[in-house]
Image (cartoon, grey):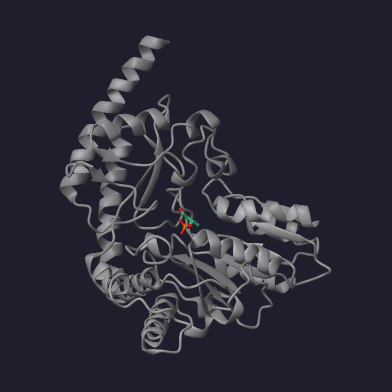
Amino acid sequence: MSNQHIYLDNNSTTLLDSRVLESMLPFMQHQYGNPTSRHLFGRAARQALDQAREQVAEACGAHPSQVVFTSSGTEANNFAIHGMASNNENAKQIAVSAIEHPAVTRPAFALRENGYRVAVIAADHFGNTDPLSLEVALEKPTSLVSVMLANNETGVIQDIAKLAEIAKSRGALFHTDAVQALGKIPLDFSTLGVNAMTVSSHKINGPQGAGALILDKRVDIKPLLHGGGQEKGLRSGTENVAAIVGFGAACALIKDELASREKITSQLRDTLNMGLKDLGATIFGDKAMRLPNTSFFAFNEIEGETLVMALDRKGFAVASGSACSSDSTEPSHVLMAMGISPDLARGAIRVSFGTNNTTEQLNAFLTVLQSEVQRLRQLTAVAV
Ligand SMILES: Cc1ncc(COP(=O)(O)O)c(C=O)c1O
């Protein structure tokens, strides 16, 4: 990859922080013990896991005993949905918001094979999950509600405390996917009012291949993976020690750096948005509370995929819709849920900043964006 290429896709994954890499290296070299072994090597690995558990817990406002390590955010979401859905024999419905990541909706829909009904909670035009729609869904006995904390496409932050309160009043458990929230906004499991919360390492400058479900221990949850009984029997399989150590180290950085990250990325995002408005773009969810680093927008009559490829050729990496489903040409399900027209939604592009992005990079991006938008508009005009 060219050194000149500029990465503006930090909601997909992030650069591994060099301090995080440093913390991982011993566990990829000479410290190779299995944490379940009783000998010196094993005990050292166990100690490293314990430390990472404390670091992850602190960044999430949780107790270390509430952290269950997984291989990814996807696994943690699957674990929550499959593991918690059967907590109430008499409630064969689960409810998920219309804007969830597929790592929540797919396991939810898979449960239909086990006789579950899935209620989809509507979103409003601004990208917020509608509490009234949740209330309507909960008229049927519901075992579990899952609504994400911050949307990966629009960046819109959901009112989880309010939604969780509604679910609780109807006896349903509540899970939130906080993969995009951790490291970008303050996060406090202890006061959020949810029973389970998903986080992932590679969205916060940690390594890929580590995630966690933060879990209220009073909740009855069934494991997805059975075997050696790791993670107190909740997630069998030898832990990915190096990745988990890196996850912990990345979490430890959040405490001191969250405010500066919010400041750096929101300044870049606000400047981008001003430039986008000058170019006539529609910015989705810009009237709602959003993550500081994310802008999701479209230009009339320009295909998002086409613009992403054109920008890539000019040295800028951005996403069209959600990166996790970018091989699909369907308009974003999040924008559909917000009532955006399919034509405009097909133009959607996401820029998500990280702290390593600079004003110079942004200025260069805006210049190229302007010329590419003009060029593509001319092509469209000729084609018509
Ligand atoms: C909101 C959300 N949830 C879950 C995931 C999946 O996390 P992971 O990549 O760790 O499996 C993503 C990844 O993009 C995401 O944005």
Q: In which quarter of the image is residue 58?
A: bottom left
| 115 to the left or right of 110 | right
Q: Position of residue 248 (x, y in %)?
A: 37, 75
Q: Where is residue 234 in the image (x, y as percent from the top left)?
A: 60, 76
Q: In this view, does 316 lie above or below 34?
A: above
Q: Is residue 11 above or below residue 209?
A: above
Q: Where is residue 194 in the image (x, y as percent from the top left)?
A: 59, 73
Q: Which residue is at a point 62% across and 52% down the rendered structure image?
A: 105
**Residue 63 visible somewhere in the drawing:** no
| 271 to the left or right of 189 | left
Q: Which residue is at a point 57% across and 82% down the rendered structure image?
A: 232
Q: Quadrant of residue 306?
A: top left
Q: Which residue is at a point 54% across and 52% down the rendered structure image?
A: 101
Q: Which residue is at a point 22% across and 65% down the rendered structure image?
A: 18
Q: In this view, does 65 lie above or below 163?
A: below
Q: Position of residue 316 (x, y in %)?
A: 26, 39
Q: Nearer the viewer, residue 185 or 324?
A: 324
Furthest-front residue in view? 39
